[in-house]
Amino acid sequence: MTQIDTVLLKVSSRCNINCDYCYIYQMGDTGWMKMPKSMSQETIDAIIDSLKSLAESQNKGFAVVLHGGEPLALGKEKLTLLLRGLCAALPAECKLSLQTNGTLLTKSVLDLCSETRTTVAVSLDGPKHIHDVHRLDANKEGTFERTIAGIQLLQAHPDKNLFAGILTVIDPETNPEEIYTFFKQLEVPSMDFLYRDGNHSSLPFKKAAFESLEYGQWLSRLWDLYIADPNPVPVSILDDITRSILGGYGSKEGMGTRVYGVVIIDTDGSITMNDTLKSSYDGADRFSSTWSIQSNSLFDVACTDEFHKYSLLQKPTCETCRNCSYLETCGGGMPLYRWREDNGYDNPSVYCHDHQFVINRIRSKVHNLLTCNAA
């Protein structure tokens, strides 16, 4: 069976802001419209019971991530029942976290997260003139000040393990030095950077062609800053690439050749594939079997051939990738980046050349450092 590494809970199917790059609301999938706005108490109870059973059945822990929409739109009462229930039911090796846009954070929510050992990561794209280009509310107004206010609450909280870090979506027209410097001055504990969603049939934002290098060049500039910084803030994507080059593993799907068991539980309790697949086509994240947390065991789902086949989607099938010297590091990238309407996922990542460019930059530096140390 494919063991489950990550359970992502879509506790709210709606969001209080409207980012123009969101794969849920802006990439053509309509599944969220059919979902309840938030999880019911019955679904929350079923999730707690099911995850407790999964923890008892598997021989390793897993991460539980509250997501959305905006997870804090669930409301404090249900959020309390969910987090306290999970904290009581799961062993310490099962890590709880919450990914938020930060605008709804309050002191009482952070106290609850601290009580239940739930870390909080915040989506922030950079300083105001960068963040407010894409991360707007329903009235087309920027959300920067509200996000920063949430981050300041996190930083002021006495639990210094609460703030997990910043998650940023790359805009290749921005200056990585400005963003990295801003985050350092903000004193965030870590940074991570995501490629924009896209594929061969719908190229990512500001990517001119399959062969173009806009994102690889941006990340390479970030790497140069990172490696030259005597007191760097951890950057997950760069650390993952470096570990992989040195023979280790990345920390999540989309880097290296390790297969991760990722399962999504929607607001109605339905069990689906990784919801980033929504950007491929409407319904791409749905299994052919209909599973729900109310009537199916997650352990039993993970034992099925269909779940195993879905997990293997992380491994590229195209000849180009399977014969590529970069495969052990890049892993072919996320499946959603391989999609093309005429042949599905049987393609290299649309970011293939970007991956090679940044891997070469990091590989060269790592080789030089190892050579110098050996001498």
Image (cartoon, grey):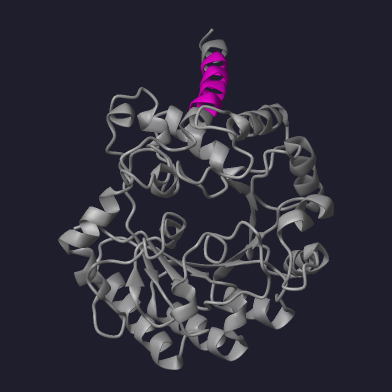
- Tell me the residue at 56%/37% (across/down): 238
- Tell me the residue at 27%/38% (across/down): 317
Left or right, 275 with respect to 300, comes to: right
Please state the extent of the stretch shown in magenta in the rendering: 356-369
Magenta span includes 366: yes
Query: Where, quadrant-wise, is the C terminus in this rendering?
Result: top right
Query: Where, quadrant-wise, is the N terminus in this rendering?
Result: bottom left
Q: Residue furthest top?
A: 375
Q: Position of residue 345 (x, y in %)?
A: 33, 45
Q: Position of residue 70 (x, y in %)?
A: 60, 73
Please tell me in which quadrant of the rendered image residue 110 appears: bottom right
Considering depth in this image, is 328 or 374 the residue closer to the camera? 328
Can residue 130 be seen? Answer: yes
Left or right, 287 with respect to 171, comes to: left
Q: Main secondary structure of the magenta part?
A: helix
The correct choice, above or below, for 299 with respect to 259 in the image is: below
Magenta span includes 235: no
Please tell me in which quadrant of the rendered image residue 61 appears: bottom left
